[in-house]
Amino acid sequence: MTIQLAEMLVAAIAVYAALGTVFALVFVTVGVRRIDPDARGMPLRARAVVFPGAVGLWPLLLVFMIRGERKT
Amino acid sequence: MAHGYQVVTWTPFKKAYDVVMLIAVGVFMTIFIVGGYMTWPDGETLHPVQLALRALGFTAFTLLHVVLAIGPLSRMSPRFKPLLYNRRHMGVTTFLLAFAHAVLALLWYHGFSEMNVFVSLFASNPNYGSIQGFPFESLGFVALVILFLMAATSHDFWNANLGPGFWKALHMLVYVAYAALVAHVMLGLAQNEKSPLYAYAVGGGAVFLVALHLITGVRECVRDRALGAAAHDGWIDVGSAADIPDGRAVIVVLKGGERVAVFRYDGKVSAVSNVCRHQAGPLGEGCIKDGLVTCPWHGFQYRPDDGRSPPPFTERIPTYNVKVDNGVVFIDPVANPAGTPVEPAVVAGAAA
Ligand code: HEM
Ligand code: FES
């Protein structure tokens, strides 16, 4: 891999992770309720457990949140 | 069950297994490090960081073998079933060990470079076209990303919200991660290690896992064929009611591959989907407890006659119409919508 390509890849991953972190913060505080009614009284620790996954899978959750439905 | 989300239910049983696992991890790493020191060839330089790096990598890789073996082992013998409960904690531990290994590798092999460490990870070895010199660290990175996604989505929240299909697909990626890791480890060894001992161990581990999966796979195929019961006026012959142990089920595989659990209890027969709403556990391998179908994996329960979890829980599974004719059980292969009440078939003479 050329240095230039590696730089682009790393930048892309960094942007993805940064957006994911911002999204995940919003998601675990207010967003979860929209997709999962069971999450209403979710304890803080459970929210912390959900956080890393939200950073990794944010585009998917964003779609669920916009749809505002629970997918089961 | 989906009754609000708890972090983890720390039953004493689970705790004991987790403690055993952590101790085993500690012992394994200690033996690895001490053994590494003692067997290191004279005259070659060995840095403690390098040994720690390897110890973390090998412990993570070994634990991944255990995680992957639990599934087929518990299908072979119910003795291994309790381990299924702890599989996700083992998976998360695998990720954490691998993560520590990767962080050390980045600091040690790339931290002193002029480049950004991550750029250095992908670009410092440009031999992507060569097998011997292939930049095996990129393969480790791919595997680490997969292990992260799996660890991060191991909580029930994700299973419920991603949908069981997507969740299962995501977790099937573990086999991709495993393949990438075999390559990562083998290529790393080819470049850094003279003794063939490690390579034999890795090869042996791979053969063991493949054989285990093949054996359980073939067994299941044979059983499915035997059960792939002949249609009978649209109804499927499940066999004699007397052959179903009381409070237990037989699993019937329909043409499309759907599995149905046919339970006998209190002189009655009911048929429900074999797939648990929690993590798709095999309900037909469970039993009737307190009049409820109870999942062998984590204990979710469903009423056999309508496939609904008792209040306050809200899970529902599909039901199937059943009839008993001359002691032979038949099911209608067309599933009813989840939660549909079905009159259980009465086994003649059972009242006596
Ligand atoms: C970004 C991710 C990763 C990086 C940068 C990385 C880097 C490295 C490096 C530099 C070595 C050679 C160490 C040496 O021998 O001096 C190595 C070896 C090893 N890695 Fe990784 N690794 C990564 C992910 C993983 C993962 C996810 C696992 C397992 C779960 C793993 C398991 C191993 C094992 C077992 C070895 C021993 C083979 C050897 O010593 O060459 N690695 N890794
Ligand atoms: S799969 Fe977890 S209880 Fe059934």
Image (cartoon, coloured by chain):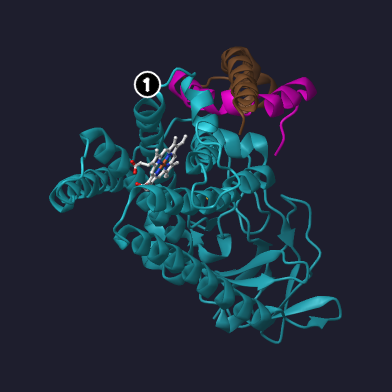
> Which chain is home to disc 1?
B
Which one is in front, B33 or B28? Answer: B33
Pinpoint residue B249: horizontal percent, then vertical percent: 57, 70
Which colour denotes chain B?
cyan
Q: Amino acid at mark 1?
A: Phe
Question: Is residue A68 rendered magenta in the image?
Answer: yes
- Taking B66 as reference, is B125 above or below it? above
For residue B277, above or below residue B285 = above
**Does A3 sit left or right of A71 as displayed?**
left
Q: Quadrant of the C terminus of chain B?
A: bottom right
Q: Nearer the viewer, residue B185 or B96?
A: B185
Identify the residue at image location x=59%, y=35%.
B158
Residue at 28% over, 47% down: B21
In-front residue for pair B117/B314: B117
Whether residue A16 is in magenta: the answer is no
- In this view, which residue lies farthest toward the bottom? B326
Q: What residue appears at the point 32 percent right and 58 percent down from the top-left corner? A: B198
Residue furthest out toward the front: B43
Q: Which residues are magenta?
A: A44-72
Can residue A54 be seen in this snapshot? no
| Residue B145 point in image, percent of width and height | 54, 36
Decide: is A8 above or below B283.
above
Q: Within 8 Å: ligand 1 and the Cβ of disc 1?
A: no
Q: Which residue lies under the disc numbered 1?
A: B112
Secondary structure beneath dot 1 equals loop
Determine the colour of chain A: brown
